[in-house]
Amino acid sequence: MLGSCYDLHEINDAAIAQNFSLDLLENGQVAFLAQTTQPVPRSETGETQPSQNISVMGTGRTAAEAARGMFLHFSRLFLWIHANTLFIGENLARQDLTLISDFLMRNRNLRFQTCVYLVCGVSIQDIHKAMNERGFAITSARGITQQIETQAEELGYYTPLANIELLERMLTPGIEPALPQLTVIKEGDKDRIVLQGMGVIKNNRLIGKLNPEQSQGYYYLQSKKKQGGLISIAWSDSPNAMAVMHCTQFTSNTRPFIQEGKLNMKIDIKCELQYLETIGDDNIYVPANQQRLEYLAEEKIKQQVRSCIIQAQQLNSDILGWGLTTARYQPGWWEDMAAQWDQVFPVVGSQVEVECILCSDGLSRESFRFN
């Protein structure tokens, strides 16, 4: 037996895909876009060349046909293993996600850890146009991946979702996926890509969304990284005064219980906080105010979590994974409820308990004042 690189491709004949995007066109065909960098001719290899993003598009009756349709006008072979972002257009998400699920599962060249985003309010062509107009890496697909990881740690607004997790949650009873959303806003004469809410999936379709407050509540319930979250609270003792804290780490546990013959969920969240800043003239960050600051932070987090729960139950999409939690901790209960979960989930009760501890950091406790 002889070993060899049976699928070897020369780098000068290939293009590294940073992103691939899928949407449904008005004529019913699937659109497939891929972002890469402008290829450098062989004669110029090694010379200093400005890097520029470009996008290539193909169309077809299926995702695979659309992806291969790109080679009708693009000569290089895409290396898909480097693509770490997937954008799904709103038209496709509202119509039927199973149009692409088989393609995502069977294609051995795609990474299962690709981060998935829903494009809302604009087309995937608009998103790619905005990425390509900016300087290299500022709004490239790789830059957006770094952006969602950074905002999760600093703000705790949006929870990343990998390609394999999207497929698992679409197929697993008792849990549904929620996707971070991208849109385009104007910034002067150019477009800028921003994260805006989260799309809620039911079975195989987009049915609604979470606003930023509800997305923060979802982060406390579903984030794999148990850190991050910005907490801003109004200080009633002084007009326009505010205190801003950061959640350095947290734990979150959800357990089912029966009360008066009805299924309920008990949610326990424990947070460690760091004080960031004071807005206003009051010296808020003093030992006498510690318990009050902790209480206000607890109420803020409760409000975000409850808002997320209300929205999920109104949409009747178990993005919270309560069905799966019940199956894990009380399989007998789940066996009785599974067939009627669509009728049970919207009326499941919940108890949210939050405990915050404001950690001492040794920083100044007095606010700066002008004389």
Image: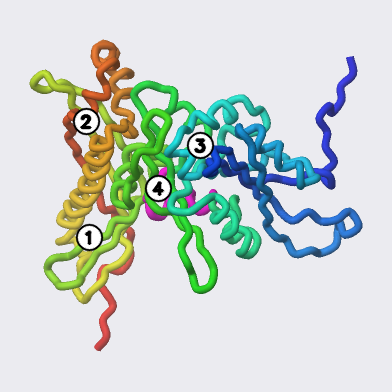
Marks 1/3: CA–CA distance? 32 Å
Picture quarter with the C terminus: bottom left
Q: Which residue, as the protein is rendered here, is positioned at the far left?
A: 260
The span from disc 4 to disc 3 (Cα, nearest Å) is 13 Å
**Marker disc for residue 158:** 4
Residue 355 visible in the displayed image = no
Disc on the earlier residue, 1 or 3: 3
Task: State yes or no: residue 152 in magenta.
Answer: yes
Q: Amino acid at mark 4?
A: Tyr
Mark found first going from the N terminus, 2 or 1: 1
Asked which quadrant contains residue 240, the reply is bottom left
State how far apart marks 1 and 4 are (Cα): 20 Å
Residue 313 image position (x, y, % from top left) = 24, 35
Q: Residues within 10 Å of mark 1 (few under 14, many from 20)?
A: some
Amino acid at circle 3: Ala
Identify the mark nearer the N-term, 1 or 4: 4
Of tags 1 and 4, the one toward the viewer is 4
Sequence-wise, the earlier of marks 3 and 2 is: 3
The earlier-in-sequence mark between 4 and 2 is 4
The residue that disc 1 covers is: 233
> Is 30 placed left or right of 350 in the picture?
right
Q: Amino acid at mark 2?
A: Pro
- Per the model, the C-alpha gap separating discs 2 and 1 is 30 Å
Q: Is residue 244 above or below residue 157?
A: below
Range covered by the magenta-colored residues = 145-159
From the image, tell me which residue sits under label 3.
162
Residue identifier under label 2: 346
Residue at position x 17%, y 51% from top? 295
The local secondary structure at tag 4 comes to loop
